[in-house]
Image (spheres, rainbow, N blue to C red):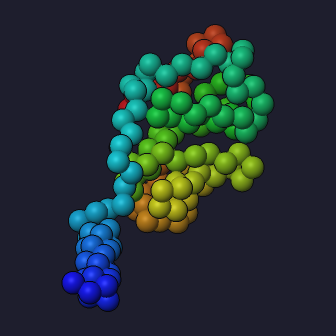
Amino acid sequence: MKRNEFLTTLTGSFSVACLACMTSACSKEDNGAPGAVNNPAPASGFLINLDSEIKAVNDFVARSGYIVIRTATGNTPASFSAFSSVCPHAGATVEYKNSTSSFLCAAHGSTFSGTGALIQGPATRGLTKFDVEITGSTLRLKNQ
């Protein structure tokens, strides 16, 4: 085989392989979700010590599949908002941005207000909200 024929064959094979990869990546069967979908721990097992955590307004804790934000002073349930950190679109983790009091799903660009309401999709609904209960200086999420 001549050098020119070899390079043409090699380039053609490479082009076919690239085209197959691009077609697979753009197929409708792939929703683009991250490989691992979040499965939060039971809400009732999520505890926060208010003597040492989220002491100032707009401070937050994000762990175990939940985000809890202090929205006002005082250790009453009305002073906190709690949400699942799982994006309702495809299960990626949302992040709370305390500088803007909003949530962002970096995986697909969904944004949510500080109340968990949907601002921009592709998600079609807001974040799951949880009630909290406070005993002494311990905050616990209530199961829905």
Q: Is residue 12 visible?
A: no
Report whether 95 appears left or right of 26: right
| The C terminus, quarter of image | top left
Percent position of residue 53, x then y: 69, 22
Percent position of residue 4, x then y: 32, 89
Closer to the camera in the image, 118 or 37: 37
Closer to the camera in the image, 18 or 125: 18
Report whether 132 appears left or right of 25: right
Closer to the camera in the image, 93 or 51: 93
Q: How many marks?
A: 0
Q: Residue at x 58, y 34 (%)?
A: 62
Relative vertical location of residue 33 with respect to residue 26 in this rendering, above or below:
above
| The N terminus, quarter of image | bottom left
Q: Is residue 38 visible?
A: yes
Relative vertical location of residue 80 with respect to residue 117 in this rendering, above or below:
above
Tell me which corner region of the image, top left, top right, bottom left or bottom right, holds residue 28: bottom left
Q: Residue furthest front?
A: 2
Q: Residue at x 48, y 29 (%)?
A: 64
Report whether 32 appears left or right of 136: left
Tell me which corner region of the image, top left, top right, bottom left or bottom right, holds residue 138: top right
Relative vertical location of residue 95 with respect to residue 24 in this rendering, above or below:
above
Report whether 64 appears left or right of 137: left
Relative vertical location of residue 20 with respect to residue 30 in this rendering, above or below:
below
Q: Residue at x 37, y 55 (%)?
A: 33
Q: Residue furthest top?
A: 136
Percent position of residue 22, x then y: 33, 73
Closer to the camera in the image, 56 or 15: 15
